[in-house]
Image (spheres, helix red, strand yellow):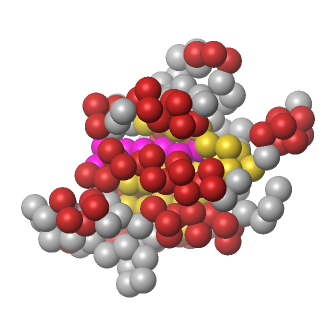
Amino acid sequence: MYQGLRRTLGKRLTIIVCGAGPADRVGNLVHLAQADGWTVQLVATAAAVPMLDLSQLETMTGAPIRTDYGQPRHGSRRSSAVDGLIIAPATYNTINKLASGINDTYPLNIAAEAIGRQIPVIIAPFVNTALAARRPFIDAVEQLRSEKVRVLLGAGEWVPHPPGTGAEPSARFPWHRAVKALQAAVPDV
């Protein structure tokens, strides 16, 4: 059945959106991924849900947005049966929990399983300089990178912003870099 899904859906991508400043613009990422030939499914953290236009995003993807372990509506596929996963914007909390192996939400479960299955995972963080300077965050990024997760952090990718200045960085969040990193990680299926 997995191969049958691949033939009918093409390249399959799950995007996990967290409750950070750029979350309300995740439709940009959906559009870029679809333009690159991906069939997209969205998973949202509880903190992201109030920031999203759920009906618009469901129309864009043609699938319900998953938020928890409950039965998917309309028979949507399991979020972990994909060819790639992007977490964007990824919060300090999500990055630290994922690196520590904490699996207490549906989005974290999807991400942890993708890493364990060696599915390409791209993380585009949205954190400020104070949080990015903390040892737990630095260690989390190193841990995830050691597991072959592509964390878009640093010069030429995404540079954290000073605390309290998230509005302008939200507007220029590098959605295109996440898709570019995915293109490099996943050959045409």
Instruction: Please indicate whether residue 59 sits to the left or right of residue 131 in the image.
Output: right
Q: Is residue 15 magenta?
A: yes
Q: Residue at x 74, y 50 (%)?
A: 11
Q: Give the quarter of the image for residue 92.
A: bottom left
| Residue 119 pos. (x, y %) | 69, 54
Q: Residue at x 63, y 16 (%)?
A: 74
Q: Is residue 142 magenta?
A: no
Residue 71 vertical placement versus 155 (above, below): above
Judge by depth and name the residue closer to the eye, 137 or 160.
160
Q: Quadrant of the C terminus?
A: bottom right
Extreme-bottom residue of the structure? 155
Q: Is residue 26 visible?
A: yes
Q: Is residue 86 visible?
A: no
Read off the magenta span: 14-20
Q: Give the quarter of the image for residue 37.
A: bottom right
Q: Quadrant of the N terminus?
A: top right
| Residue 25 pos. (x, y %) | 36, 49
Judge by depth and name the residue closer to the eye, 143 or 92.
92
| Residue 53 pos. (x, y %) | 36, 33
Instruction: Please indicate whether residue 115 sits to the left or right of residue 176 in the image.
Output: right
Total numbered badges shown on the rendered structure: 0
Q: Residue at x 68, y 50 (%)?
A: 38
Instruction: Please indicate whether residue 57 sits to the left or right of residue 148 in the image.
Output: left
